Image (cartoon, rainbow, N blue to C red):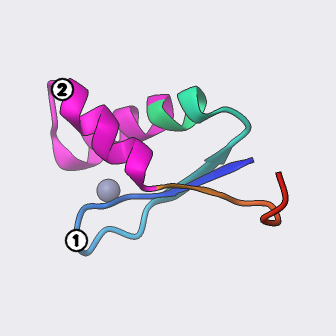
């Protein structure tokens, strides 16, 4: 399970998903709706990925 918290200062939005790709998809949708980002650029996807954490215990 992956956990993601929005990296925009002052925004406390967060999500969980099984797959990193799903987290990125949800985060991209959030960026469009909440932060009026009409274009999701590749570097934004990279930025999202750097903020994804494992929600389960540390063993993998
Ligand atoms: Zn946000």
Q: Main secondary structure of the magenta part?
A: helix
The numbered disc on residue 41 is 2
Question: Could you tell me which residue is drawn at 71 percent across and 60 percent down?
Answer: 55
- Near mark 2 (Cα within 10 A), the count class, few <14, some 14-19 or many ≥20, is few
- Quadrant position of residue 30: top left
Real-space CA distance between mark 2 and mark 1, rounded to the nearest whole angstrom: 19 Å
Indicate yes or no whether the magenta region holds residue 49.
Answer: yes
Residue at 40% of width from left, 51% of height from top?
50
Residue 26 in magenta stretch = yes
Q: Quadrant of ligand 1?
A: bottom left
Looking at the image, how many numbered discs can be counted on the residues?
2
Q: Position of 12 compared to 45: left or right?
A: right
In the rendered structure, find residue 9 and report the number of the disc placed on it: 1
The x, y position of residue 16, in whole percent, is: 65, 49
Position of 52 with respect to 54 (left or right) is left
Viewer can see residue 53: yes
The residue segment tinted magenta is 25-51
- Secondary element at tag 1: loop
Q: Residue at x 42, y 41 (%)?
A: 27
Q: Residue at x 22, y 71 (%)?
A: 9
Q: Which of 14 and 1 lies nearest the eye of the viewer?
A: 1
Residue 40 visible in the current orientation = no
Residue 36 percent coordinates (x, y):
16, 40
């Amino acid at each position: 399970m992956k956990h993601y918290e929005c990296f925009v200062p002052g925004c406390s939005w967060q999500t969980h998903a099984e797959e990193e790709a799903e987290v990125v998809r949800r985060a991209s949708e959030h960026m469009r709706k909440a932060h009026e980002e009409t274009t999701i650029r590749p570097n934004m996807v990279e930025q999202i990925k750097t903020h994804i954490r494992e929600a389960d215990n540390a063993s993998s």
